[in-house]
Amino acid sequence: MVVSAAAFIVVDWGTTNRRAYAIGHDGGVIETVRDANGVLSVARDAYAGEVAAMRARLGDVPVLCAGMVGSTRGWAEVPYVPCPAGIDDLVAKTLWVEPGRTAIVPGVSAGGARSDVMRGEEVQLLGAVAAGLAPPDALLCQPGTHCKWARMEGGRIADFRTTMTGEVFALLRHHSLLGDFLKGDVVDGPAFRDGVAMAGENTLLSDLFGERAAVLTGRRDAADVASRVSGLLIGSDVREQALRPGEPVHILADPALGQLYASAVAAMAAQPIVIDSHAAFLAGITAIWDKIHDR
Amino acid sequence: MVVSAAAFIVVDWGTTNRRAYAIGHDGGVIETVRDANGVLSVARDAYAGEVAAMRARLGDVPVLCAGMVGSTRGWAEVPYVPCPAGIDDLVAKTLWVEPGRTAIVPGVSAGGARSDVMRGEEVQLLGAVAAGLAPPDALLCQPGTHCKWARMEGGRIADFRTTMTGEVFALLRHHSLLGDFLKGDVVDGPAFRDGVAMAGENTLLSDLFGERAAVLTGRRDAADVASRVSGLLIGSDVREQALRPGEPVHILADPALGQLYASAVAAMAAQPIVIDSHAAFLAGITAIWDKIHDR
């Protein structure tokens, strides 16, 4: 029997990874467990057992899940909440998979002329505003495998779009002809900024091959290719957002990736503001939990 | 002992595939052998044996090779010939790996502000003009894994650029989150043309994710995704070339891929002209052979 001061457990349950936090009554994190048991590696009938194991470790308290665990590949499908979506909207559609014990927060969908979806990122976006890390009307950027660009209005997610930037870079690194040149570290230096500048030409498909050719013909150092291709992709991503000069962009990311996006945003003459994504997530999930509790 | 009417053997020796043709004294193809023994599957010391095996099958005659067999991964590295490059330039730099018996045609490099390289495609490009399939001053397009766009001037390759279009589509199909939706056939229909039109927005990275989201939210039929993503990529590729209205584009490809590029070129208000890539290759390699013979 584990004796814990946890008030509840939060699980950020993604496609390939999972993070569980025991949250204390003061809102602080007591313990964090991170593993690779994302939804791709959990059978549908194994979720209840997985959560029971978490409780055995972190405390016998309610569990609040967010992310792909609420998708068709997860424990139970929780329908998307359409934009505009605020914390109240998510709370209203939270699904109790174990009544009073375990709940899953819904994802959010964007409509209009195009379609978009998110599962998990909404907690961080809404939390950034809830924690005062970003104003209620703001453009937020969450870089990653699938980078989210969200317009917040009145503290709700008004609209968003997802770019496949991180996934495309990973595909090129692991599976493409350019792969041998992309194993190096990406750093925010001259090569990265060259790549960002190249993005202005809107010739992504030929620029990618040109990187390989420049190495083969001895015109460029192979060690720079990873940074330049990253700059080209992140630069293309930022460019697609058509930022206004001076427009503030609140970036929620780990420090390394946050710095790369900040550099690209600054290169487009907009104003990058890097904020603490971990604090945003905790603020968001705590705000959701408090509202669920109040109901 | 094989008795053959072949005058010489031509090998189009690529990264993953290889095609060998026995060419008769009249320039016609006597026999074709196609297999998967590209340079990635042949050890450097095994090339002489591979060519001896071809001679045993197709005739004990000279062998002329083109393609990645002349790269650092191939039999022997043959330096690139810089643009502008014509048949005479290739002949002058052809490398005899077995004197009087086996030669490798060099690839071509493009310089200027950007870098580009080709190995193998130059034969088809120069052959298209040699055979009268394209005029001496023309824009030629060779779709494929790495699509080549070549400006011909006076029958020589004046400049070119390579787009990673086919490889990016294959990466998405085989390795990405979109992969499940990309297994279907690509056809030149409304979905493909929608994709071509979407390319005009210059928002490739977000449009790719949007295709997945549109299926997840039930707004689009999963069966159309492969055609729309192909249209988006090919449309982006064609768009990067900044074609002038009415500009003729000579397309060298198999009929299916040629039709897709022709459709995208027409959508950009340029004039597609599909020509026979096989005839172009044979005309090119025969012209090179004749010049070698004359020396």
Image: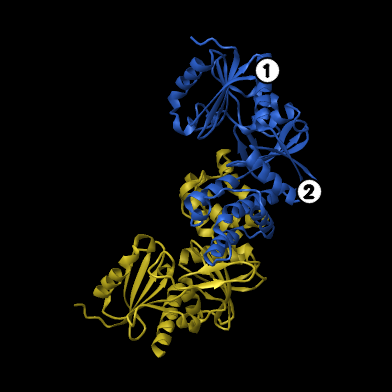
Chain colours: A yellow, B blue
In the figure, is residue A97 to the left or right of A91? left
Residue at the spot x=66%, y=41% of the render? B258
Q: Which mark is residue B230?
A: none
> Residue B281: x percent and y percent?
65, 28
Q: Residues within 10 Å of mark 2 (few under 14, many from 20)?
A: few
Mark 1 is surrounded, within 10 Å at the Cα level, by few (under 14), some (14 to 19) or many (20 or more) other residues, namely: few
Q: What's the amino acid at mark 1?
A: Asp
Q: Is residue A81 above or below residue B286?
A: below
Q: Do the residues marked 1 and 2 share a common chain?
A: yes
Q: Are marks 1 and 2 in contact (CB under 8 Å)?
A: no
Q: Is residue A273 visible?
A: no
At which x and y percent is residue B80?
Answer: 61, 32
In-image side of B227 versus A182 (left or right):
right
Name the residue tied to disc 2: B244
Residue B61, can we see it?
Answer: yes
Residue on which disc 1 sits:
B290
What amino acid is found at the position of numbered circle 2 in the picture? Arg
- In the depicted structure, whether residue B51 falls above or below residue B166: above
Residue B139 horizontal/vertical position (percent): 74, 39
Residue positioned most to the bottom = A294
In-image side of B171 versus B134 (left or right): left
In the image shown, does B77 or B171 lie closer to the viewer? B171
Q: CA distance from mark 1 to mark 2?
A: 36 Å
Dot 1 or dot 2: first in sequence order is 2
Compare residues B269 and A252 and report the one nearer the observer. B269
Q: Quadrant of residue B92?
A: top right
Q: Position of residue B60 (x, y in %)?
A: 53, 12
Q: Residue at x 68, y 50 (%)?
A: B240
Q: What element does badge 1 sit on?
A: helix
